[in-house]
Structure formats: structure tokens, C-alpha cells
Image: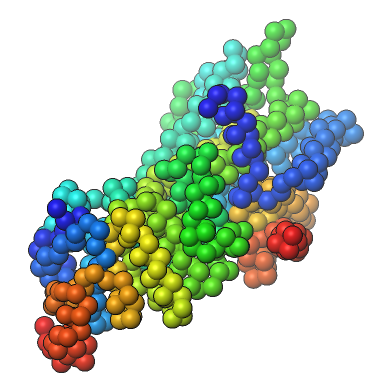
Amino acid sequence: MAILETRQLNKHFGGLHVTGNVDFALQPGEMHCLIGPNGAGKSTFFKLILGEHLPDSGAILYDGEEITRAKPFERIRKGISVKFQVPGIFKELSVQQNLTIALQHHVAPEILQEEIDRLLAFLKLSQDRKQLAGNLSHGQKQWLEIGMAVALKPRLLLLDEPTAGMTPDETFATGEMLQELNREGMTLLAVEHDMAFVRQIAHQVTVLHFGKIFAQGTIDEITADERVAAIYLGEVDA
Amino acid sequence: MSSASRFTSILKLIEGPQTLGKGPKFWSGFSVVLLAACAYPAFADSYDVGNNVYFFNWLFMAMGLSLIWGYGGALSFGQTAFFGVAGYAYGVLTINLGDAYGLTLLSLVLAVGLSALFAAILGYFLFFGRISGVFLGIVTLSVTLVLERFMAQTAGPEWAIGKARLNGFNGMGAMPSLTIPWPGGNIVLYPDVTLYYVTLALLLVCYLGLRILVNSRFGNVIVAIRENPMRAEMLGYDVRKYQLATFVIGSALAGLSGVLYTSWGNYITPASMGMTAASLPIVWVAVGGRTDLTTTIIGTLAVLMVFQSLTIYGSQYALIVMGTLLVITVLIAPRGIVIALISPFMRRKSKLEGER
């Protein structure tokens, strides 16, 4: 059974159809990338999955259970977690506190510190635990947020452009982090522009265009598809 | 966990990331200030001591606003609404029930409870309706102004609850002071040395209790909501419930101020919920440093004392100074003047810790 499934999902803002009849299924253990030109509806699709927007019609199922109208925090409690595009961290709080807040509601107080140390090591932030999160470098902020998302021990992790603004080295290191999480059993769905990164991590790729699924397959199949190249050059209409 | 070790782990929260001041230095300074406050009545005229309880009365409201605004990030302009509701409720209850058998203490609890209930109802619509930012300020300000207008038109004899006349703009008076039943004669808390110690003790309990609250898991979540509500929600927290709980606690503290003030002066007027009254708490906590309980208290006391001494020359004049003070704070030290003054020391200290 798919861990995440959307059925005929629709969302429009006024006359603009940003998500049109999307049927999408994500298998457990998969690392899946969502690509598409600007305005393809990738972010809206994410917001629908998270409950930030409610769809006009269609259904969203998580692990076979319908969550179409569930509140965002209820979806998180079921095992979905997210890393936003712009780092969503608590800037005025220390790195340690950022992780504490992510961990405290499901980790017993006795092992909280142990868990924080483990995450800090994983994120390569052990030296910066007392630093205010707002003082970290951009790449470190992205990692901290990935850490907060992972702290919830989700079964499904959504990542909206996780490497935006990172150096090539940081991007590669991020890919390795995500692969490690995937090996531990986490399913990942990422919106991403950086094709080298997509090639590094993705098992499957879905191309969105004008709110519809345009193509699906492995990265090699997608890059070989001339129609996909054409939509990035603006040569295919909806 | 045994109850004893649970108690110690709760006590440990008295220091933490959400409160400035920790370690032996801070607590020895704290003890000196507390001892000085305890010793003060021995060196002053008891009439002055009773008068100066006035300053303590407002600190509960200031701490409540620090919790809602400084920690929770929700600018409530309505602290005076809860102050007024509790103050009038105390008046109506005690005038009807009298001061025997500890009924004034029951009235205190009921009046504060009523303001908390009012905050819960208002807060439900605000936070579950996802009203935030400047709109929260506008709605809460409107509520306090509506209450002021309403109470102002209750001058006629038809506006009475039981024996208690509301009295419109003239204000309601002649309610009994808080009275503690005691073997061998009730202790009436007139503005005097006894009231001073009782209020000081209440203040101490609220201050330490709030320190524990803001350093607890609950406190972690409310500062997280201040920093980034969407992230907090996406960590699985029902942000609305936390905001509502914070609002109710902070507003109930304003209610406590209202009861103490009404009992202290045996008087409350609609003006206590008006525009001027509503804006002053914002000045107190902004000037001191709203994101910390201790700086809020220091700032509030300092501003109140300056305000009182200026009022001698005319209250309008004093208000202009308060407005100027707020503008200067926002421009020069947006996090608060007390925080700006102590932050060089804090920074040096944390740098030293980093080098070690």
C-alpha cells in the first residue's frame, strides 16, 4: 500500500488551476523528487499534503487513511514531517533549544539530552549547540531545520528545496544525510531544482507542469524525455 | 519518578533558557533586593508603605503582558479589560457578600476566575479564528474601550447588582478591603504594612511560578510560536491551544492586579479600562524588556515611579513623557532599555563560555 496517495486532487485560486486532477502515489521507502518549471504547482501540492491549503476536490490518503481535511498538526502527529524552503527555525533561540522543542513531546526527559547530542552529531552542529540559530550560516540553518523535521521520527519526510542556497559541497553532504535517513527506513518526497542533487538521491522523479503530472520515471528516463526538456524551455503548453 | 524527584526537577526550571539571571550571583543579588524589600517597612512610615503597595499592584498585570506579548508574541492591548472586569467583580461581590468569614478572599478568587473565563471566551474567538498581529491588538483594544464606555453610562440607580451601584463615570467605591479571617480578630488589609507583606509574598510566588512556567516544556512551545508559528505547528503542536492558555494566564494576572488595586483603594472607575490606561502597560513592559520577567518588573517599577513623580506636575505632562519614552525605546532599544543595558555584560560572559 502507498504511504501517500492523492486521488483526483484539485485546487484553484480564482480562475487559476494550480493543481489539476493529480493522482499520485508514493511507495514506502522511496526517495522521490518532484520537479517542474516555476509555477508548475509544486509548492501548492506540498501545501495541500500538509494541510496549509485545503483542496477544492479530491482526496489525500496517508497510509490508507484519509487526511484530506485534517489540521496540519494532526497530520504531523500521524508521522508526516516537513522542511520548508525558507529555513523555518526559531532564530532567537539556541540550536540546542530548537532541537529540544522538536523532541520534547515524544522523547522522555531522561534521554532528551542524549537524543539532542545524537542529532547534533548527525547535523555536524555539535560545536554550535549554544549558538543562536539565527547566527548560523545559511547551509547550517537548512541542516538544523532538517534536524528538527527528522527529530519527530517521521515515516514520511517532505522537503521543499532542501538545498536552496547551499554550496555544492553542502548540497552533496545534504544528499548523504538524506540517503542515510532513507536507509533507516524513512520515505522522502522532495521538491528540487538542482538536477545534480536529484540524480544523487532520487529513485523516482515526477514532473509537474501547469498543475498536472506531466511525466514520471527514473532520472535517466526523465532526462532522456525530450518533452520534459521542452517544457523547461517553455515550448509545451498545458 | 518519585514525587520528591519530580518536585526537584520542577524547581530546577526556575533557571533556564527563557529567563535572564542564573547562578549564585543572580540569586544573591535577588536575595539582597528581597531582603531590602522586606526591611523597607522598618525604615519607613507605615502610611508611605501602604501607599507604595500601589506600585506592586500593577506588577502582576505587567508580568501577564510579558507572558502574552514578550514570550508569546501576541500583542494584547486588552490587559485593562481583565483588570476592570475583575476589579468591578470584586466590588460587586464584596459589597453584596460582606467581609466576614473570608468572603473577600472568595470574592478575589471568583473575580480573578471571572476575568480568566472572559479571557478564555474572547481568546477562543481570537486564536481559533486565527487572528494575529496588529488585528489582535485592535480587537483587544476595542474590547477594553467598549467596556469603559459601557461602565461609563451606568450612573443611574437602575444600574445596580444587588446592593452594589455601578455609578458610571464616578466609579464604584465603598467595597471592603481584603480581609483574612484570623482567630482573635480578622486581619483587614488596609493600605498598611500587613498588606505590603501580603502583596510582596503574592508577587514573589507569581514571579517564581512564572519563571518555572516559561522554562517548562509549555514555555518552550510559546516562545517557539513567537519565533515561527508555522514551524511550531509543523512540529505537531496545536498552536491555538497554547496561545489561548497563555492568554488566559496573562489576562488572569491582569485580573489579579484589578482586584488588588480595587481592594487597596476601595475604588474602581471606568477610566481604568480607557485608552490611556490601556496603553500604559505596553509602555512599562516595552521599556524594561518584555521578553524577560525580571527586566519587565524592573522596567515597570522604574517607569511607574517616574510617572508618579511627574504626575505631581500634571498628569497630561507625564503622559507625554511616557509616549516619548516609548518612541525612544522603539527607536534605540527595541528589545527594551533594561535588556540593552545589561546585554554587554551578558555577551561578554557568553563569549567567555565559548572560549573555554
Residue at position x 30%, y 50% in the image: A79
Q: Position of residue B57 (x, y in %)?
A: 66, 38
Q: How many marks?
A: 0
Question: In this rendering, is residue A223 above or below B112?
Answer: below
Residue at position x 29%, y 62% in the image: A188
Residue at position x 50%, y 69% in the image: A140
In the image, taking residue B199 as reference, residue A201 lies left or right, namely left
Residue at position x 20%, y 80% in the image: A220
Q: Position of residue A6 (x, y in %)?
A: 15, 60
Residue sitting nearer the eye, B107 or B21 = B21
* Quarter occupied by residue B36: top right
Give the quarter of the figure containing the C terminus of chain B: bottom right
Res B289 seen here: yes
Q: Position of residue B336 (x, y in %)?
A: 66, 60
User: Which residue reaches farthest top?
Assistant: B184
Q: Position of residue A164 (x, y in %)?
A: 40, 76
Residue sitting nearer the eye, A224 or B179 = A224
* Quarter occupied by residue A145: bottom left
